[in-house]
Structures are given as C-alpha cells and as structure tokens.
Image (spheres, grey):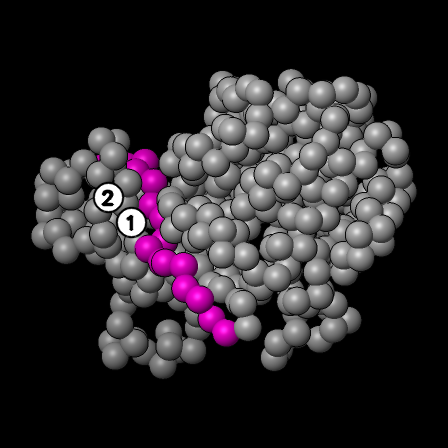
C-alpha cells in the first residue's frame, strides 16, 4: 500500500479549493496519462480522460476540489475578512494556519484569529465563535502591505495542514474529501484490465453545487457511472451506530440512498453489479443509507434521459475538517472493488 499512501499524501497536501483545482488536475493528469488514450480539460475545468473500448461505457467520477475560504474584505490595518467556500463547521476554522494563493502563483501564510477569550465577556465565551467574527492575519500592518503581496478581494485560501501517519495503517490530513476518491480512481485505473470504454473524470466545484458532474456527464453520456467519495464513519465517542453504522477497516461503502433520497436512490441493477463483484472477489463492503450529504452521483444520474449511477465511498472520520482520518486498508479495498467492477460492467449493462 506504499504507492497508494504516497499518492494520497501528494494529493492531500496539494491545494485546490472549489473553482481553483488546477494543481490537483495536474497531478491527476500525470498519474493517469500512461493508462488512458486521451486526456482533455473541458471549459468548466473538469479533467476528462478516456480509455477506449467497447460498450457499455462507464464513467468514474471523483471531485478534485476541497472546501476553503476566499478573501472578501481587507481592513485598513491589514486584517482580512473571508467568506467560506463549501460546508464548514465554523469551530474547526478558529486558530488554523492558512495559505493565501495569489494570481502569480505565490503562497502567503496567514493564521485565522478572533477576539481573544481573555477580553470576552462571559456571555461571549459561552457561545461558539462564528466565521464572520474571525479574520486572517498574515502579519501585515496595512492594506497596502497585503496588496503588495498580490492578495486582493477574491484571493482563494486553503488550510495549511500536512499528511501524517497514525497507527494501524490509518492516516490523517486535509482534503481527504475527496483526494481519497481521486487516489482510488487512479489506483483502480492502474489495476483494471478491461475491454470496456472507461471515462475517468476529475470533477470541479462539487463542494459548491456538484457543478462539474453536471457538465461532464452531459458531455459524455455514459451507459453507467460510479462516483467515488468519502462516507462518514462512526465508531468513535459521541456517535451511535444507529446514526453512523459505517466504520473504519470494514471495507468500501456501497451507497443505497443518501440525503434521505434527495441525493440518489441507487438503482437495483447498480447495487447488484457492485455487490456481486464484491462477493465474487471476496471484498468486504458496507452498505449505507443516510439522511445528510450527497455526492456527484446525485447530478450524474439525472443527466439527459438518466444514467444508472452508484457510489463507492471510503469511510472517513471528521469530514470537512483539517484533520480528516481514514484507513489505508479501506482505500486499497475500494480501489480493488472499483477495478473489478469496471472489468465486469458488460455482464450487467
């Protein structure tokens, strides 16, 4: 699993918030180039690679973007107010170190601060601090110093965290949602020996409305599709099994339904394809029915006259935080399930 770990680390440590996925796209293109026949980037920024073959065609989608921030106002004293890009739980942002990405490609370090608790009234300390009351401090003493560094209103901002190894083949880092899905997609492409046409798609702006999935699926019009993403893992204090039955080290997650059915209700034909494949190759898997959250599959399956679509998820703790945590064993098994499913797609569609 060393190679899988290395590519996950490279992807997670790179920066690419929604709308600014170029650095991630470049890594993916380099990794998959030997295994596909054609690579292009569409007008929205999706990376679309094609491995030519016979029908049925299968689209594999994993989103490139991570949640982040954007500068919305620079104060005269050099502090920056920001807007959140994607779904943040505000408490995870406070006191984080960040990277501000300039138009010229520069990276400027800053920290997220707020009014110190030592100067708060009791009623203020008893309430969570909202992102609107936080600011980015890069050490500048004026707006002019900030602007001289190439930072303006609209500058994208990402979290400054690095991949780290834990015990039991578990790892932590930022942006595993969805760099884990990208790593699985890359690895499955390397492993699969298939005669069928495969579209490998790194979608953009998933975290802000599943946008890249909409345009790429319309363009490709595949016979079937699979979205690869993270899935919320429980198995830790504060969460009961009835609320999150998915756990680490128990294999990939096959989604039956998400967002209470407002996202996707996976077609029985797709479920059979994935479950049969897992059984045939003795790959442990988990099933998921959830009330919250959805993936690119929610848009893909509604494209044109409808595309049968499923989701393979990798169990991940602390999603949408700078310290997401997952098991490399689950990454490996997810890639194996995807690779074998691609090879057998003609038996089902």
In which image quadrant can residue 54 be found?
top right
Q: Nearer the viewer, residue 61 or 100?
A: 61
Q: Can you give x and y, in whole percent of width and height, for residue 260 in the image? A: 78, 51
Q: How many numbered circles are shown? A: 2
Q: For mark 2, what is the residue? A: 107
- Checking the image for residue 99, the label placed there is 1
Q: Nearer the viewer, residue 171 or 91?
A: 171
Q: Can you give x and y, in whole percent of width and height, for residue 209 in the image? A: 58, 37
2 and 1 marks in contact (CB < 8 Å): yes
Q: Can you give x and y, in whole percent of width and height, for residue 194 in the image? A: 72, 31
Q: Judge left or right: residue 247 versus residue 181.
A: right
Q: Can the viewer see residue 25 in this picture?
A: no
Which residues make up the magenta segment?
Answer: 152-167
Q: Nearer the viewer, residue 74 or 215?
A: 215
Q: State which tag comes first along the sequence, 2 or 1.
A: 1
Element under disc 2: strand
Vertical arrangement, residue 283 with respect to residue 44, above or below = below
- Checking the image for residue 285, the label placed there is none
Vertical arrangement, residue 129 with respect to residue 225, above or below = below
Q: Can the viewer see residue 345 in this picture?
A: yes
Q: Can you give x and y, in whole percent of width and height, for residue 138 in the image? A: 19, 53
């Amino acid at each position: 699993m060393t190679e899988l770990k290395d590519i996950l680390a490279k992807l997670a440590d790179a920066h690419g918030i929604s709308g600014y996925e170029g650095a991630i796209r470049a890594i993916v293109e380099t990794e998959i180039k030997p295994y596909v026949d054609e690579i292009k980037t569409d007008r929205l920024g999706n990376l679309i690679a094609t491995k030519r073959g016979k029908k049925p065609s299968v689209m594999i989608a994993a989103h490139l973007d991570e949640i982040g921030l954007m500068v919305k106002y620079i104060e005269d004293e050099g502090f920056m107010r920001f807007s959140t890009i994607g779904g943040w739980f505000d408490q995870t942002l406070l006191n984080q170190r960040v990277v501000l990405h300039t138009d010229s490609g520069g990276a400027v370090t800053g920290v997220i601060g707020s009014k110190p608790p030592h100067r708060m009234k009791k009623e203020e300390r008893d309430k969570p601090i909202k992102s609107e009351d936080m600011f980015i401090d890069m050490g500048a003493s004026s707006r002019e110093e900030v602007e001289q560094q190439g930072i303006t209103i609209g500058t994208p901002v990402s979290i400054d965290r690095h991949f780290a190894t834990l015990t039991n083949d578990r790892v932590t880092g930022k942006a595993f949602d969805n760099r884990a899905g990208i790593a699985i997609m890359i690895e499955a492409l390397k492993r699969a020996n298939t005669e069928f046409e495969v579209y490998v798609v790194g979608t953009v702006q998933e975290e802000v409305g599943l946008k890249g999935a909409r345009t790429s699926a319309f363009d490709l019009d595949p016979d079937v599709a699979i979205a690869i993403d993270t899935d919320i893992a429980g198995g830790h204090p504060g969460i009961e099994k009835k609320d999150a039955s998915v756990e680490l080290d128990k294999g990939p997650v096959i989604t039956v339904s998400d967002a209470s059915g407002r996202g996707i209700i996976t077609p029985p034909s797709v479920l059979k394809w994935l479950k049969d494949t897992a059984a045939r190759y003795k790959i442990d898997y988990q099933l998921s029915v959830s009330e919250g959250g959805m993936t690119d599959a929610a848009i893909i399956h509604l494209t044109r006259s409808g595309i049968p679509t499923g989701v393979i998820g990798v169990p991940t703790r602390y999603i949408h935080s700078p310290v997401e945590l997952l098991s490399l064993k689950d990454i490996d098994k997810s890639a194996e399930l995807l690779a074998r499913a691609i090879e057998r797609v003609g038996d089902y569609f």
